[in-house]
Image: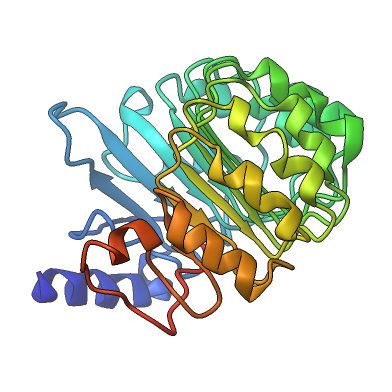
């Protein structure tokens, strides 16, 4: 395994030699993140025709499909996952008819999202730069009826601008990162089947959000790191029926409140300095201290 990873790293570091070409990364879980390097890997599933394509758009074509087409051996019908790390034109994205997962690192616009929203099979969407999105862009996202996982980073919108999330009835995983305007009212727009919620650096999310969480019977993983929840959220957090993991690092919950959660919750509780649920400690299991998992989905 170590030999394979070294080979992938060496090939991807040879960017100038491989510009506009394809690199076969031997370690599927390792993402090539070097400018102007394109990688294609067979996905380890039962379907032999399933492909994951990680595309770096540097010099050359500015269109997703055209860039991928120039990569040797890529067939549009086989591409299920694409990672984009430089600004690119998404207008021909519809040619990737089997696309299920898309991660975009540069800032996206409303027109970009409108093109992305035409992907009927999309299951996972990660937008790591959302400063330019307006309510119109969020409306486009709300049309992705099959979407199961959504990550929004550095979004400037908030309040009713996010009401469209309620239309994503298939949504199971929601990650909101560095969004200063989102508030506890977001709880009103979450689909009932949500299973994983992660907030990171969202200071206006407070106790009003946590108070309604027990209604989500399928919620298993919850991270409120970097929010403003306090001890007032503790009773509600204890009532979430299916919760197995809770992160409350960098919040206003006191030591006493954290102790209550650790000793009374059935979930594993992560704080700034401790890991492990109190119910497990009482059974004599090991406790790892001075460790926080950070963002772990």
Quadrant holding the N terminus? bottom left
User: Which color scheme is applied?
Assistant: rainbow
Q: Nearer the viewer, residue 183 or 145?
A: 183
Q: Residue at x 26, y 39 (%)?
A: 73
Relative to 144, say whether 10 is above or below.
below
Residue 126 appears in the figure:
yes
Relative to 169, say whether 214 is above or below.
below
Residue 284 falls left or right of residue 257: left
Q: Nearer the viewer, residue 66 or 140?
A: 140
Q: Residue at x 90, y 30 (%)?
A: 160
Q: Residue at x 63, y 65 (%)?
A: 257
Residue 176 appears in the figure:
no
Where's residue 197, x and y in %? 57, 43
Q: Residue at x 34, y 70 (%)?
A: 12
Where's residue 284, x and y in %? 21, 68
Residue 226 falls left or right of residue 195: right
Residue 170 falls left or right of residue 24: right
């Amino acid at each position: 395994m170590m030999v394979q990873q070294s080979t992938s790293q060496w090939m991807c570091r040879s960017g100038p030699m491989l510009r506009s070409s394809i690199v076969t990364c031997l370690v599927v879980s390792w993402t090539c993140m070097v400018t102007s390097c394109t990688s294609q890997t067979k996905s380890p599933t039962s379907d032999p025709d399933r492909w994951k394509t990680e595309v770096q758009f540097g010099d050359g074509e500015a269109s997703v499909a055209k860039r991928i087409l120039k990569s040797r051996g890529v067939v549009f019908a086989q591409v299920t996952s694409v990672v984009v790390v430089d600004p690119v034109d998404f207008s021909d994205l519809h040619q990737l008819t089997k696309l299920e997962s898309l991660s975009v690192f540069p800032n996206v616009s409303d027109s970009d999202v409108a093109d992305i929203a035409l992907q009927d099979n999309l299951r996972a969407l990660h937008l790591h730069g959302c400063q330019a999105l307006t309510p119109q862009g969020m409306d486009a996202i709300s049309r992705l009826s099959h979407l199961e996982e959504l990550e929004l980073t550095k979004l400037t919108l908030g309040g009713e601008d996010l009401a469209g999330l309620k239309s994503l009835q298939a949504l199971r995983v929601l990650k909101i990162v560095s969004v200063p305007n989102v508030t506890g009212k977001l709880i009103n727009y979450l689909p009932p089947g949500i299973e994983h919620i992660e907030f990171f650096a969202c200071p206006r999310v407070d106790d009003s959000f946590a108070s309604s969480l027990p209604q989500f019977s399928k919620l298993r993983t919850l991270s409120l790191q970097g929010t403003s929840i306090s001890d007032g959220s503790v009773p509600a957090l204890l009532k979430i029926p299916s919760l197995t993991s809770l992160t409350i690092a960098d919040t206003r919950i006191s030591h006493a409140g954290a102790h209550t959660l650790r000793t009374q919750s059935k979930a594993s509780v992560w704080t700034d300095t401790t890991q492990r649920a109190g119910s497990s400690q009482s059974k004599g299991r090991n406790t790892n201290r001075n460790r926080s998992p950070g963002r772990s989905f």
